[in-house]
Image: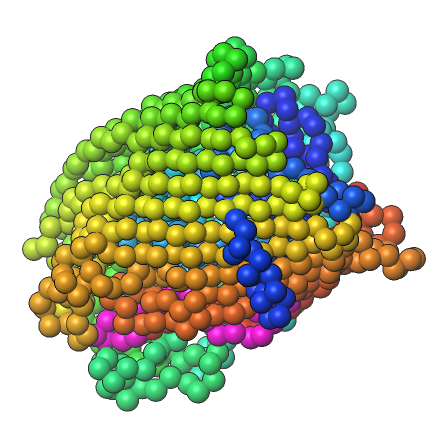
Amino acid sequence: MIYSNAIDQIGCADTTRTPVTNRLNFSRKPTGALALALLPAAVGMALSSSAIYAQEDNRRGKLEEVVVTAQKRGVVENAQDVPVAIYGFSGDMLETAQVVDLADLGQLVPAADMPPTSPIRGYANFNIRGMGTIGTVVTEDPTVSIVVDGMPLGIAAGGVLDVYDLASAEVLAGPQGTLFGRNTTGGAVVLRTRRPSGESGGRLEAGVGNFGHFEVAGALETASSNGDLAGRLAFKYQENDDIFDNLAGEDVGEREFYVIRPSLRWQASDDVTVDLVAEVGKDEGDGPAARNIFNPLTTVSQSGFVPPDDKFDLALNDPNNNKLEWAHLIAEVNWSVGGGVFTSVTGAREMEQRSRVDSDGSALSIFNFEPWVDQEQFSQELRWSGQVSSALNLTTGLYYFSQELDYKERRVIFDGAVTPALNSRQDHDQWALFAQGVYDLSDSFSLIVGLRYTDEAKEAQVASFGNCSFDFANCTFDQDLEESWENLGSKLGLNWRISDDWLAYASWTRGFRSGGFNGRNPNPQTPAGPFDEESVDAFEVGSKLEFFDGAARLNAALYYNDFEDLQRTILDADNLQTVENAASATISGAEIDFAWSASSALTFFGSFAYVDADYDEFFGIDVDFPADGILDPERAADLDFFNVAKHSASASFIYDGIDLGRAGELSLRAGAFWKDEYPSNIRNIIVYDSIFVTNASATLRLPGDQLTLSLYAKNINNEQYGQGAAATGLFFVDFIAPPRTFGARLSYEF
């Protein structure tokens, strides 16, 4: 079965008018014997930085071209021609793989950890190639930038987005300093929603599942008689009942979610296209499933609390809750001019989140907190990309970003004996100039040179813990801070076109992560900053190869990243939290990715990733537990990176086009992912066991190609695994993933 998806829904200049077909991409983790068979072969070949696997021609059993937009050329490009580690997926691929949000997407990308939660639901503590964040200090910038329709999100809070009705999703692995700028020392996640196609029609969907899951969704389109003006309305509503039994109170897991996304496309002329995309959404319900971890040295365990026997049972006296609301408006203009494409992307977003977190994960009132986040942001990018001469392609532009943050937090400690509160406010402005050129040295070799100058300023007012009343009505701001930074990001690369089907490349990139202030300052006596920028020099070599007359694709990458002034959120002996430039580090690794169309119906996918992350030095941390207040720089340098598995792997397959006669056509898909053990906190006190999770789906397309019925199951083997943990002298806690889920969806296209 071929799933059609017009490139013009990706939306780049005139080239977007050419339709292409997109084939399905699936979860890339090993499935038992299949994994054992596939992985050695995969490791022996070579991965890619480019995996948008699909788009296949069923009749010939041949892998079709994969297209990406993340290089900001103004036109779509074949991913095999892009000398960058890109993992890309069409919207059809995501739907078939039952990808609902960015956390599911993370299971499809090697060396990526994209959990849906932390102590705060929806907080995007994403990690790519060993570089990520672990805390929830909202003024601490992310290492992985999330870009929605050309608009980067300014903070990690509220960043675990639903992916309904996407045209494409691209994960860029490794630093992206020139084209994407700051806060991409780990990488970037680039999302593009579907745009109006110029035709009338649409689809409606409904689904049910276990734990009372219910959803309705759809996308409706219309257009003017001449096709110059077209509109699309996408929407989704989803709810579920409680998922986890809570032995100490109300059960946990209930959730209600909706998103509404109207979009408008105006073909102003043959050369000018204007897109407007708006979105409003709300995510409300219980917070993360906090489960206490017994340790005889913690206050909770010494108080006699023992976690429930069943691995999915909780015992929370004050179950978590969460309410997140957001709205944004994005305007994109593409103008074919001067032998290239001029693009303007204007974005404005506001979000508000209110949460309550039972941090100790127990039936005791030891440590609860309530974080409140309010954010408004504005961004503007102007760029031009095109062929300057027969040998030189240039992308150049100007970028501006500003945001306002207001963060409040209050805590209830020891059943209300201690109730500190704080308030921090931050204004943030940044502008940048960038240019990247590709110069053809010959028919086989080309040179990439890129530069990005960034000027950034932040101002913060901090009322540290103890300087706010519990209701935030009275706050004394004890610190008034400001700082500015300038940096120059750069890239140098060499591409070698070995043959029409084989590209090799080598590159060096320098990237930065913004400096800032500690918005969760422990007391007025402790400076809230500033901490400086984090920098990285990244070296990568890669290969992208197609063979067997286009029926197989093998891509590989090796990288070495050198980090200086590494930012770390640190708890001291008194459980006080600071943000410091505490370390330098080296991260190296290898990735392998492949796809093989064994026949017109059967296709295999697989991947393997190796990450070796080491601190060169690590100052300012007490490694001992319980903490003795003495810093341990030599022992700290031997710590493993948090949330980084040294080995990870995936495998999946699709068996497509099974003819059932009058019943229609059936597609089957199965996949799994595996990760080696890894520590889940900075001091390596809590170490997760290796995880192995399997998923599967079956899709029946009924005669007439209008009705589709899908059955799916996630976490079939009912694996209990964590999505983030915390360790203090008061408690150890884990925030666990849901158990096995399954359901059915019915879709009608018209």
Q: Residue furthest bottom?
A: 304
Image quarter for residue 655? bottom right
Location of residue 635 in the rendering, given as x and y in whole percent from the top left corner: 17, 66
Of 363 and 733, which appears nearest the observer?
Answer: 733
The one nearer the camera, 464 or 431, is 431
Q: Is residue 341 left or right of residue 615?
A: right
Q: Please tell me in which quadrant of the rendered image residue 335 appears.
A: top right
Report the residue at 11% width, 72% height from top.
628
Residue nearest the viewer, comparing 557 with 115? 557
Q: Is residue 492 left or right of residue 566?
A: right
Residue at position x 39%, y 41% from top?
540
Residue 366 visible in the current orientation: yes
Residues in magenta?
713-732
Spot occupied by residue 91 in the image (x, y as percentages of width and height): 63, 45
Q: Classify residue 281 as left or right of residue 203.
A: left
Task: Quadrant for residue 550, please give it.
Answer: top right
Q: Is residue 437 above or below residue 135?
A: above
Residue drawn at x 53%, y 35% is 503
The verdict on residue 722 being magenta is: yes
Q: Residue visible at 14% across and 63% down?
A: 634
Q: Position of residue 378 (x, y in %)?
A: 38, 33
Q: Quadrant of the C terminus?
A: top right
Image coordinates of residue 538 in percent, x first then y, are: 33, 41
Q: Is residue 330 visible?
A: no
